[in-house]
Image (tube, rainbow, N blue to C red):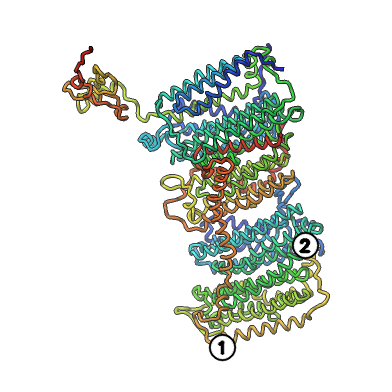
Amino acid sequence: MLTIQTPEAVMFWFLAPLAVISAIGMLLVKKAVHSALLLAWVMITLAIFYIAQDALFLGIVQIVVYTGAVMMLFLFILMLVGVDASDSLTETIRGLRPIAITAALGFGGLLVSLIGRATLGREAAGLVDANSEGNVQALAKLLFSTYVWPFEVVSALLITAALGAMVLAHHQRSVPRATQREQAIARFRGASLGSAAGLPNPGVFARHNAVDVPALLPDGSAAPNSISATLKARGDMLESTQFELSEVDNTVTEEK
Amino acid sequence: MTFTAPVLNYAQLAPMLIVLGGALIGVLIEAFGPRASRHASQLFITVASLVAAFAALVRVRNQSSVDAAMGSVGFDGAGVLLQGTILIIALLSVFLIADQENFTALAAAVPGSSEERESLQLDLRVTEVYPLTLFAVAGMLLFPVSTDLITLFVALEMLSLPLYLMAGLSRRRRLMSQESALKYFLLGAFSSAFLLFGVAYLYGYSNSVTFAGIQASITGGSGNDVFLLLGIAFISVGLLFKVGAVPFHAWSPDVYQGAPTAITGFMAAATKVAAFGAILRIFYVAFANAEWQWKPALVLIAIVTMVFGSVVAITQRDVKRMLAYSSIAHAGFLLAGVIALSKSGLDASIFYLFAYGIATVGAFGVVTLVRDSAGEVTDLNRWSGLGKRSPLVASVFAFFLLAFAGIPLTSGFIGKFSIFSAAYETGSTAILIAGVLSSAIAAFFYIRVIVLMFFKDPVEDGTSVVIPSALTTTTIAVTSLITLILGIFPAPLINFIESSAFFIR
Amino acid sequence: MTTSTSLVYLIALPLLGATILLLAGRRSDKWGHLLATALSASSFGVGLYQLSQMLNRPTEERGVSQKLFSWISVGSFNVDAGLLLDQLSICFVLLITGVGTLIHIYSISYMSHDENRRRFFAYLNLFIAAMLLLVLGDSYLNLYVGWEGVGLASYLLIGFWNQKPAYATASKKAFVMNRVGDMGLSFAIMIAFATLGTVSFSGVEEASHTASKAALTAIGIMLLVAATGKSAQFPLQAWLGDAMAGPTPVSALIHAATMVTAGVYLIVRSNFIFDAAPTAQLLVVIVGAITLMFGALVGTAKDDIKKALAASTMSQIGYMVLGAGLGPAGYAFAIMHLLTHGFFKAGMFLGAGSVMHGMNDQVDMRRYGALRKFMPITFITFGLGYLAIIGVPPFAGFYSKDAIIETAFNAGGVKGILLGGTALLGAAITAFYMTRVMVLTFTSKERWEDNQHPHESPILMWLPMAILAIGSVTTGFLFTRGHALVNWLSPVVGEHAESEEMLLQPMVVSGLALLAVAIGVAIAVMKYQRADVETVAPQNVSIFTRIARKDLMQDSFNEAVFMRPGQALTSLLVKGDENVVDGAVRGIGRTALGAGASLRKTQTGFARSYAALILIGAIALIAGIWVVTQ
């Protein structure tokens, strides 16, 4: 019979509610980053459970692969897409949300009630047996003997995934990239020599030195081409005039 | 600790290994091959590996063993037949896929962007579909011969992933295509989760993930059946999703419509064979002794699926959606073979899968031919009068529809006949009645399309039938010929199936 | 039963012709029609050879069979694609190939100006092959294949001139009406398989001795539905008149001699079922009686010569169905009338074609008249056919129709008097309207349109007409001499049972029939020969005439019985999709989940609602588990 020691029970009752709450929170929070972090926490909790149940290797893998790699990848992508980009959460199908909630509760309720009824009619094998030769060794043995075929086939699955990513994301270059030499020639043979020495840097002001403020040319006019085209397109370019010294309110009030 | 090296029976695994090898060569060609010759070399590699795999399969057709790959793969007569069917369907579909008019020039380009226009002008091609197809085929070959739940899951993912991708590669109406691919992917992942959940329950029930182990637990188990039933239910959800049984069918009309037609044909035919192969094996081998627990639910699903597919198909206005609903109805008919749970049920199912798969590839092949300046025309109203404009193409399509409807002298008749009589023999009268009734409803909408094509006046809006390429012609000719031959001389194939179809336990 | 390996050639020869002509395409334009005719004739030759072989064998061994291949073998159920040639099918084989060959010959000339003549001959050959398969199949399933095959071939032939919209509509009507009949046949096969476990003729015959009466009645009624569709019997008769839009040789072959009689063949072939199911048999009689009157009445009002002939075909087949419904006493007479009718009606259709040929494709009989002088051969051949159909002795129709009328009178009781009376009245009306056709076309005054130069048709056209005319004169006598045909058929359809008590002596019946004919002829002659006939059909006529002109309201009937419900069903289904399915989903949303909101159609296009559907499916499954593991 599998015995559950008290410290494990204490840990379970402490962590399990946290895991469940985080999982529910993951669904309810508005911001994607928070959601991702809560998911990461759920995974860490699961890893702790695995380790506590003597499945050391699985626990470590859970942390390294899921929490460490996959979740961080999620976060990277969220950052790339823009952390404040959010989906519309308005439900367009009337009544779907209550149906979904009822269905989820019903599913969970039925499942809990059913598992409560289940009997196995035999002793659970337990990890003591499975780990008799060591946790990693036993896993390795299974992977490289009994399940060697599916294990090998998974490699094909991974190739498919990589190939698919290439198909969906790789932009084939339709014209060859211009070499440095060609670019230089183009600059000097161009209509004007204005940009022959390269584009000006964005403005540098005492009060504002961000990339979204255009530089001032010697004649005092702003140079829009000094800032990134992306910012310009997004409409994030600021007026440089508002940061000129003359505009700053320089009346000093004496402190008593 | 001792480690004994695993023993694999390479001869029996050869079909899968050859297909996988072909796929890998394809990937290497993508990486290193000159662009100009990629299409030709990919096509060659794909066809060659499918043919070689078939040859390898023929070499080992009489073998059987439970130990082809350490208990993960069961090699037996039914497996050989199903794998052979998949390879033949795949080869015919590849001929359709080779007509690159179906595919986008550059999948990464935003629809409507200048990059898309440039890539179209440069005549770029997504030649990756060939290795992707081969990966899918390898997964399909593995799916019906898997004898443990882990291999089953891996095979399921391996056949699904390339299909999710390829569904999004349509050349025209790309947003719809991409949407359908994403839907397919999300819902596929959802159903896979159910399948895995089921695997966990079955492992809990039987302390084993092999079909044999589960079967042994069912006969000798002493606990109650809750875990077993939960496992069967959830695994069924995952598998029934793949075949498009109600209520797990909702993806199929959207995906059938959105995917490039050649891929739709491949997916509709080959996936159905692979998934029904797996369903047959798991229900006949692992769950057979729990028959009384799962049969009522499956009977209900089968009836609902037949009736729903047939009734809803009537109201469809798009030929691809109509074929999607018809494929849902056919999933219901095929479930009758699973429910029969007898040797004749197995034989009938395998025959039906072969006949239906071939006819499906052919029907979608015809759909690729009806076009206007903006691509394929799938609106049924614009098919009216097609019989007057292109009698041959319309007649071939009508013939496939009659095969779907199960009219005598087509393969569909023999298939339906044998599968219903198998179900009837084992006492499933309800299935027989529902099957005959929904066949009658289904015949109504197939005949409606035939009437539309032959008796309505043609619409003058630029819809025309293009002259098919040699490869497409081959596919359509071969599929219609097989459909006809199976309607007239089915006996050789039926006898062959009867003598060799069995599941090794 | 004797086996033979040569039966297949009967079918293979015309099929080969159709294949060659269709595959060779335009290349065979020069010789295609000759090849098709030769192959049809050689099939007739094979038929004659088979007949001579059959005559050399003792009565009980005359049937021969040939197993072609094992078609379906599923579990305990086996159907071989097999052929069966017995005394019944040889009659049909000779009729189909014989009349078929004559019509091939006729068409060589009749279609000589059509650029698609080769295709027409390919379809003719295809039709012959399918029709032979129909009568040679040894099981209901094989018969069904031929049944569908003739349907397809006739659709191709009726719609041969499909550039004209009216013709295309006609072929569509025939297509739809025939599908209704086909449903009957397929249901009959399904019921037979489900209850008797076999679909071969011999198997069903054996099983019919022990099967339940309810099952046999159901099979019989379904077979009758099939027969009404194919043979243009009430209430599925409407397509025949419209099908006259096809080329005239097609009308002669398909709508007079062969295909439309397939229903009679089916009923006679299934004699064992109808003998064991009196209710179904009674229905057969009723359908036959109604149709024979119906067709005759429609015939009196038609001005289109082909439509008048079509109406008479309908009526004459009504006689055959009536005969077939009278049980063992009538089967042989039904077949006899079928054979004689095949001769005289085909001859008359070819004659009509010849008249049209000479009159610039004019079909309105009010525009004919006095053609006797210009088309003597056509007049004589048509006239012999006419004498045969109205039943003047010693022409063929007299023997066969008289036999049916007599059998009807002797059916016993009130039923016998009613049936006999109907048949007799039908004979009188037949005499009336056929005389009308004869008078209007050949003997009355000229009422031609301008620029008409009637002329006799070429020899290739009148020769077949002459041969058929000889047949219409002699066959009746030949068949009845010493009860030749009755005895010939008795091994297949059962011993011919003379009824114990005869209501009327044969002589009396013949006398009555002749009297009826004489009255009909006399009225027609008075009305049409003596008086001037208007060239445009008069409009101020009685309501009865108007109804008759409208084919006794059959189109209105069809619209009410078939089209409206069909349309209603379709719109119901569409509405059902919108309201019921949607509404049901709404209902679940409101009641079960109490959410007050509702799901829209299940197919919303949103992945999340599809996922919800999958989840609900899974819940339903585990709820089931929850219930069963309580």
Which tag is nearer the camera, tag 2 or tag 1? 2
Disc 2 is attached to a residue of which chain?
Answer: C
In terms of image quadrants, where is residue A90? top left
In this orientation, which residue lies closer to the viewer: B255 or C65?
A: B255
Q: Looking at the image, can residue C612 be seen?
A: yes
Disc 1 is attached to a residue of which chain?
Answer: C
Side of A31 relative to C380 (left or right): left
Give the answer, above or below, for where C626 lies relative to A76.
below
Residue type, mark 2 in image? Phe
**Which residue position is annotated with label 2?**
C272
**Which residue position is annotated with label 1?**
C530
Q: Position of residue B485 (x, y in %)?
A: 63, 47
In terms of image quadrants, where is residue B354? top right
Give the answer, above or below, for where C221 lies relative to C577.
below
Name which residue lies at 77% across and 74% down. Answer: C411
Side of C299 relative to B215 (left or right): left
Q: Looking at the image, can residue B81 be seen?
A: no
Residue type, mark 1 in image? Arg
Q: Crowdedness of circle 2 by 10 Å Cα count: few (<14), some, many (20+)? A: many
Q: Going by the picture, which residue comes out furthest to the bottom? A: C530
Query: Which element carries disc 2, helix, strand or loop?
Result: helix
> Marks 2 and 1, Cα distance to the nearest angstrom?
52 Å
Side of B306 relative to A81 (left or right): right
Q: Position of residue B105 (x, y in %)?
A: 42, 35
Quarter holding the C terminus of chain B?
top right
In this orientation, which residue lies closer to the viewer: A22 or C462?
A: A22
Q: Position of residue B430 (x, y in %)?
A: 70, 47
Q: Going by the picture, which residue comes out furthest to the left? A: A219
